[in-house]
Amino acid sequence: MKDIDIGPANKGKFQDPGFTADGAPRATVALEGLRTLWVNTGTLCNITCANCYIESSPQNDALVYFTTQDLAGYLAEARDLGHPLEEVGFTGGEPFMNPQIIAMARMALEAGHRVLILTNAMRPMMRPAMRAGLVALNREFPGRLVLRVSLDHPDPAVHDSERGAGTWDVTLQGMRWIRDAGLAMDVAGRAGVSESEAEVRDGFARLFAEEGFAVDAADPAHCVVFPEMDLTVEVPEITTACWGILHKAPSEVMCASARMVVRRKGAERPAVLACTLLAYDPEFELGGTLAEAGRPVALNHPHCAKFCVLGGASCSG
């Protein structure tokens, strides 16, 4: 039995990678070609959110700082394996806590890849050295660097209830600096259980217009709105029949084109995970190399169903 908490609502489900609780064959996703390499820069963060999927905080160093040496090895392996790598995404924790983030971003850009950095746009990003580094990268590699800012909600009170009192104001200051520095910016927020995604996007559209942020609130590629990652909610398991029922292809799921690399505290080498959402479940650790991580991924977790396949739909029909 799995020892990872999947919530009481899903008790008895998501146990066998081959079959669902009712005996149906579980859906799997093959790696069709690595297009996005996610780098977890470390789980340390300057704030502690109320509902962080990776439990980042100023104390959590379960994933320690990734290094330029670590990244160089994976970029070389991706090239040697012939992967069509297009983008390197940096996530955390807060990536700007990692002292090598600018150097790692430069390494990825010099290798010809686009770079996406997820950030809360707060004080770690706003340190003078980080700001100078970002400006230099944007000047040297125009159009290839994007910062995706975590702004949980267009309502400051809702945002602060998740991230802490006063965090809205600090994040807005960082976003204004990004705007004024001419850097490309995306936004990632959340939709609560009592509101629709459309309502959240409308609120973001008003905010972006007021602030002069060049972000299209209606475009999910540039304004990402996630549902809350609530393990108390029951979700259906994904069977092989679901693809046809949902009219969705396995190639549309993140793990068909992406992997995440991490360095666990005390580990001898970095590890490759199936995706960004499942940092601690050993079932989704695929080895230490990209070659080892090329095998299919069984969709054996509630996050696989809720976030990557269903998107609010149901395959129970």
Image (spheres, helix red, strand yellow):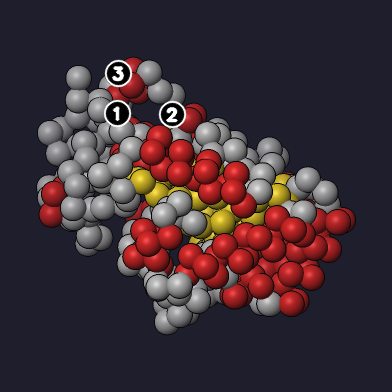
| Left or right placement of residue 214 versus residue 135 in this view | left
Where 241 sits versus 118, above or below? above
Element under label 3?
Answer: helix
Element under label 2?
Answer: helix
Mark closer to the chain start, 3 or 2: 3
Q: Residue at x 56, y 56 (%)?
A: 149
> In front: 245, or 76?
245
**Residues tagged 1 and 2 counted as in contact (Cβ below 8 A):** no
- Give the foreground label among 1 and 2: 1
Residue of label 2: 250
**Which quarter of the rendering shows the N terminus?**
bottom left
Residue 309 in sight here: yes
Residue of label 3: 245
Mark closer to the chain start, 1 or 3: 3
Residue of label 1: 313
- Give the foreground label among 3 and 2: 3
Counting from the top left corner in percent of width and height, residue 183 is at 74, 54
Q: Residue 170's image quarter?
A: bottom right
Counting from the top left corner in percent of width and height, residue 146 is at 68, 51
**Extreme front residue here?**
210
Mark closer to the chain start, 1 or 2: 2
Element under label 1?
Answer: loop
The span from disc 1 to disc 2 (Cα, nearest Å) is 15 Å
